[in-house]
Image (cartoon, helix red, strand yellow):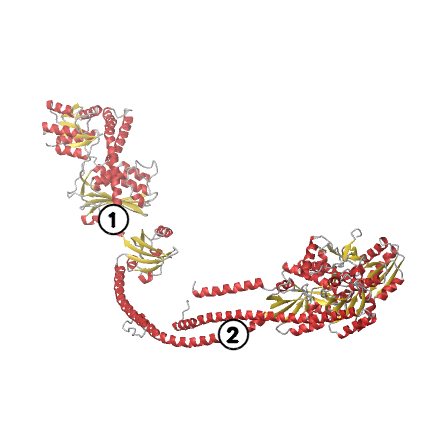
Amino acid sequence: MKKTHTLRQSLITSHILVSLIPLCFIALFILLFIIRNANEDFRVRIDLLSKGIRGQIELFMDQPLTSLNTIGSMLSDSKSASEDNITRILNTHIRESLYFESIYLLNPIGEVINAGLPVERELSRPDLIGINLVHKREFQAVRVTGRPQWSDTFLSLVSGKISLTLYVPSGKNVLAADINLTTLAQFIDRLSSDTVVTMVIDSNGAIIFHPNPDLVKRSIMLNDIDLVSAALAGEERVGHFTLQGKSFLGSTSIIEQTGWVSLIAEPTEKFSSFLIIPLLIIGSGICAAVGLSLVLAVLRAQKLSRPLTEITAKSSIIAQGDYTNPVPPNNFSELQQLADSINQMATAIQKREAELRDKELNYRELVENTSNLVLRLDRNFIISYANHTIQRLTGTPIANAIGMYFRIFIVADDWPTLEKSIRSWVEDRIESNDAECRIRNQDGETSHLLLSFNLHYSDEGSLTDLNIIGHDITVRYEIEQQQKELEMKRQQSHKMELLGLMAGGVAHDLNNILAGIINYPELLLLDLDKDNPLRRPLITIQKSGERAAAVVADLLTVARGSAAVHEPTDLNHLVNNYFTTPEFQKLQDSHPDIELTFTPCPDIWLCNCSPIHIEKTIMNLVMNAFEAIKTQGRVEVTTANIAAEKLADIAANQPPGKYVAMTVRDTGKGISEADQKRIFEPFFSKKGLGRSGTGLGLTVAWNSVREHGGTIAVNSNSSGTQFTVLLPALNEASVSQKQPEEAAHLRGNGEHILVVDDEESLREIACNMLRLLDYKTSSVKSGEEALTFLRNTPVDLVLLDMQMDPGMNGRETYSRIKKDNPLQKALIATGYSTSKDVEATLREGAGAFIKKPYSLLSLGQAVHKVLQRDM
Amino acid sequence: MNRKAIFFTAILVAILVSLGVFWTNRAEKPILIGFVAGLSGKFADLGVDCRRGVEMAISRVNQSHGVKGKPIEMIAMDDGQNEKMALDAVKSLLEKNVPVIIGHATSSMTMTTLPLVNGSQTLLVGPTSSTSLLQDLDDNFIRSCAVSTAAAAMLARYLITVKGARSAGVIYDLGNKAYTGIWFETFKKTFLAEGGIRVEPLTFTSKPDLQLLPLVQHMQERQVDALAIVANSVDAAMLCQQVRKSGWQVQLALADWAATEQLINLGGSAVEGATIQQFFNRKSTKPAYVEFKKEFENRYKTEPGFGALHAYNAAMMVFKSMNEQHENETLKQAILRISHFKGLQDDIVINKYGDSNHPTYMGVVQNGEFVILEDYR
């Protein structure tokens, strides 16, 4: 947490800094000035001291020179003096002088001819007398110049101390004296003090005098110090140098006689001590100023901070929501402005708070009361907010829903897709998008929702939370599903229609062909004996033709609009009829373990239907029920009357009215939901190849029933399937079943019948069959010829083909015939015609119609029926 | 980052920088080494020369980051060519636990203090102690100069074969008997073996009030063909002066001990023509020596003597060995392991006893200078 300072602290610090900084700068400038002047004084002082000491040394060095010059003059003047006298003179000087260790008298060729020695060295005299020092540079210089010469310093082999030799002329001879520098050393030592170091350096740069004798003894060389090397080169200087790890300020002076350098030095630290007092004074002044500033600053800060503290306290009260206690006025104009501003701010906040409360209430009501689902999820899809709709949709109270994972409410199959979508939006930084999913309540019921997502991201781009508004689209979804189903059915219907057109196209020609195959064997059989071996092949040909005709009939039934004869029919009667057929017997024989029960409705209403087609429907449904049971089971057939009010329970989409129902229920494995949608499609079959027919069974059944204005309802589950056939009921009483008429009873009495057909073979067959029935026949190949024939020759009946090509068709021909003779009876024959054409022709007066290929019996019945009819 | 974190980071950085600067500029604790030689009296010229040689070596090695990163510092002590002073000086150095003492300049002082050194962990490295009495001994003494017997034998053969001497007088200083005694024995043995007839010895002990003239007169009476002087440079110069002032025209021969600048400075014309052995070639043109000589003269305003050269070699040998010294290895073991060292003029090869060998030159004083007799090596 950031550390804060009080205003008082800040003011005190500012006051101190304001007073201290200029003070420090002034002190710094004063200090720099003092240092500069002190440094200069220090240098001047040390230089003066150096020059003074140089003068002292030079003065000291003059004394042995003067003494030796005096001796030299003395010896030179007393040429007659004996060696002993000379020895005595020299010894006297040695033993009484402080300056000499020994004095040698050298003759012009450099041989020591006499010597003054201290007493303790007197024994060396024989050794010294006679030795040759001509090689000494100083001796030769004296000889050449006649002036005194100082030798380099050397470590005396006698005394073990630094020494040097002074050469002076003495007439033709030369006096060489080893100088005792002890006195000089003592003198220089006295010039040194604790703070001032006096040292002498010889012309080679070695220390020869220093208060520390060890440095002299070790012949420390100082010629690597700039100050010394400059002096040895002839330049006197003042400057800093370091010796033995200690810093000095020194001044050099050159001693003329020997070329030595006197170096006077003071430790630099001493210079620092000069600055202590000014520093103390300045420091004390600064401390006093700081103290005074501190007192003034504290007083001033207190005066300034008190009203601020008061304003702060009032602000806290305002912050707590109490706007009735304004900040009081203040003497400082700035603080007064601050107080006014705070008061204005408090008023503004009060007003804004009220507005915000209203807005917040509105928004809250909007969100809380909307029928839409409103959710907020965190980045882990955990619900952090939910409105009341969550409870309506999921049954989970809001309090429980908060903190739960959103996915818990989503139908499991939908979540992966939804999650994947959200993840992809996050990857693409999409901020809003929609998705559909199902949400499940606690009872397992689902609702379809359209979810509108708003995704929020952090500055770094990661998902922070999501807002979701969910629209309940369950109703809309169901409507859409129904529309989809209707569309599917429409497509199915269209498909069937196309198939019907195709079937119809071929049915006419096929029936014409089949007529020959069925009718000729029938005619031939009438002429053959019962033992005739040709009967069996002819019967086989006839049956094959009939089966082919049945297939064509199925196709024609599939094609809607196929003409059929509708008559009031007892559905129980049709079911019973089927159970007596050989086909059913065969079916039952092949499934011995299947039990069949039929429960007829005792007072079943009649229905207007084509018995042939309904019988076929019954057959197909029963056959399917048997085949749905693999080994053992039961097939139940029931009939029932369905009152209008109960219709909706069975088939909600059927037009209202009374219906008769036939139900076929099996105990097979059931039909899957997907297959239920397709079982009425042509050629859809789950049966193995060769097990059953054409795949048209249920299609024929469906189309037949739909032709009758009824429907078939399917209800299937794993324990079995139930087909319910609904047919519109008639309000007529049940009629008794007509007995089939034998062909013999249908014979005519020579009535004249005109056969009109464009197919020559069919004309021939029809004529033959009618003649066998004792009718007189004529035939023409077109409608135009028929009109011409009838104008000339009246007939009792016209057997009129519906489709003829080229020329007029059956319907047009009959219309023209009716114009010429309104009482003319006619029987319509057709291989395939739409029910509209047939119905229109019948309405115009045609007595009946017969489907090609027809049998002798059916032809006889039809002709008989029309001839019996009154016009 | 808040202000507090910045503040503490700045403080931390300042501390680290200070530590870094301190660490970089910290003064490494120096390695102390000892030096001992005669820095006063008649022997001082050789002692000071040796000390300057060591100072040169220290200066150079410190400029090259010292030994294993540490600077070298020398504690120099004066033995005054005096047994008591020598023992005191060495004791003082041993108390300071110096790993090595370079010194003494004379064999007699080395003989005096070596027993003390042998009882310690300190190694004594002699630059000019050439006595054969310390030869082939496994002790705490290692030297960078050759033993003196070879020089004595060479001088004896030279006097016989070149100067035709058949009798020789030998004046030698008992103050450095460890050197002079062996020198004389070797000389005598060789001289007689090479065809000499007799060798007349005369001894003295160097001191301030010594009378040298009687020694010369005594030897003159024995009428020898050659006079060999085995003494320090001062005594040798004075003896030569006595010979010349006596008018004795004898072939002077000087041992290498006397071959310092002081001999010429004091002897002057008296030492002209004297045969003198040299421990090194003053006229060598080898780059290492030429550079060393130039730097030495700049620094000390005088020419380096054999003491400076051998002390420098000895010091550099020590520093190289310290640098390459293995863990758990003594300095002596390191020197013996390395054994081959570059010298200013010749390589130094140390044998297993710590003795070395190097060429000895025969020379003559000519016009106040030492001149090497190149045809007699």
Which label sits on residue A479?
1
Of pointers 2 and 1, the one earlier in the residue sequence: 2
Relative vertical location of residue B156 with respect to residue A787 in this rendering, above or below: below
The amino acid type, in three-letter code, at marker 2 is: Pro
| Residue A477 image offset from top left, x and y in percent | 27, 50
* Camera sees residue A595: no
The amino acid type, in three-letter code, at marker 1 is: Ile
Q: Nearer the viewer, residue B215 or A381?
A: B215
Quadrant of image for the N terminus of chain B: bottom left
| Residue A498 image offset from top left, x and y in percent | 25, 35
Q: Quadrant of residue B171?
A: bottom right
Label 2: which secondary element: helix
Name the residue: 69% across, 73% down: A186
> Relative to residue B49, is residue A127 drawn left or right?
right
| Residue A736 image offset from top left, x and y in percent | 17, 39
Count of numbered badges drawn on the protein: 2
* Camera sees residue A627: yes
* Residues at discs 2 and 1 in contact (Cβ within 8 Å): no
Label 2 in the same subunit as label 1: yes
Q: Nearer the viewer, residue A551 or A29?
A: A29
| Residue A173 image offset from top left, x and y in percent | 78, 65
Chain for numbered disc 1: A
Q: Which residue is mark 2?
A: A278
Q: Quadrant of residue A845?
A: top left
Relative vertical location of residue A42 with respect to residue B255 in this rendering, above or below: below
> Relative to residue B196, is residue A549 drawn left or right?
left
Chain for numbered disc 2: A
Q: Quadrant of residue A698?
A: top left
Label 2: few (<14), some (14–19) or many (≥20) C-alpha neighbours in 10 Å = some
Instruction: Give the CA distance from mark 2 to mark 1.
Output: 105 Å
